Image (tube, helix red, strand yellow):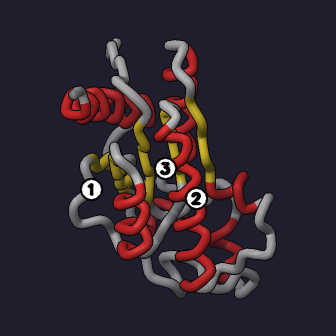
Amino acid sequence: MVKSVPPKGFVVWLTGLSGAGKSTLAEKLYAFYTGQGFQVEHLDGDKVRSIFPQTSFTKEDRDEHIKRMGFIASLLEKHGVIVIASFISPYSEARHVVRNMCEHFIEVFVSASLQECERRDPKGLYKKARSGQILYFTGLDDPYEAPVGAEITIATEQQSIEESYQQLLQQIEKWNSLFID
């Protein structure tokens, strides 16, 4: 078991296509850090969007939404909270803005092919997008700009969720050791 002892607040930003495994990994991380007695907050794209239902899926609205969530993450981080953020966050420029807002930012690219994500389709979103019920769907009619310099890449298509989670924990511990003053 990983003995991860965060020195202070930090942000783990999981990005990837819908169905790649971001929320599943984030929930496991949340449970782990909560079980260790740390202050943790999980900001999840689907849950947060229910609070901001007027936010559309245009590039402009997505960028604003991600910047808003990044600002919230940075405030929580400053107060010693571990922030686990799981958002598709498809545009590299918006992720870069969030990175610059946060002091200790770990970008995690949860990687799975479009074909695999569409096969999984846990919420039936790809099916709806293919039938025209959802517009601006990332990976289909809207781009996903994969991170070039992510601190961590987790290939969920090549390993089980448990293997992905263990890899993620080990990599976060490695990055946390760099945060210690």
| Quarter residue 181 falls in | top left
Looking at marks 1 and 3 on the same chain, the residue that comes earlier in the sequence is marked by 3
Residue 119 showing in the rendered view = no
Q: Secondary structure under badge 2? A: helix
Q: Quadrant of the N terminus?
A: top left
**Comparing labels 1 and 3, the label whose residue is closer to the camera:** 3
Give the residue displayed 62% in from the left and 50% down from the top: 44
Do labels 3 and 2 touch, CB within 8 Å?
no
Image x and y of residue 34, in percent = 57, 20
Q: Quick check: 21 left or right of 1? A: right
Query: Residue at label 2?
Result: 69
Looking at marks 2 and 1 on the same chain, the residue that comes earlier in the sequence is marked by 2
Image x and y of residue 75, in percent = 54, 47
In front of the other: 11 or 46: 11
Gap between marks 2 and 1 measured at Cα: 18 Å
Amino acid under label 1? Ala
Image x and y of residue 168, in percent = 34, 35
Give the residue displayed 19% in from the left and 33% down from the top: 178
Image x and y of residue 50, in percent = 79, 59
Q: Secondary structure under badge 3? A: helix
Amino acid under label 2? Met
Looking at marks 3 and 2 on the same chain, the residue that comes earlier in the sequence is marked by 2
Query: Residue at label 1?
Result: 150
Decide: is 168 above or below 98.
above
Q: Quick check: 12 left or right of 62? A: left
Disc 1 crowd rating (10 Å Cα; few below 14, some 14-19, many 20+) is some
Mark number displayed over residue 134:
none
In front of the other: 20 or 115: 20
Decide: is 145 above or below 154.
below
Do labels 2 and 1 touch, CB within 8 Å?
no
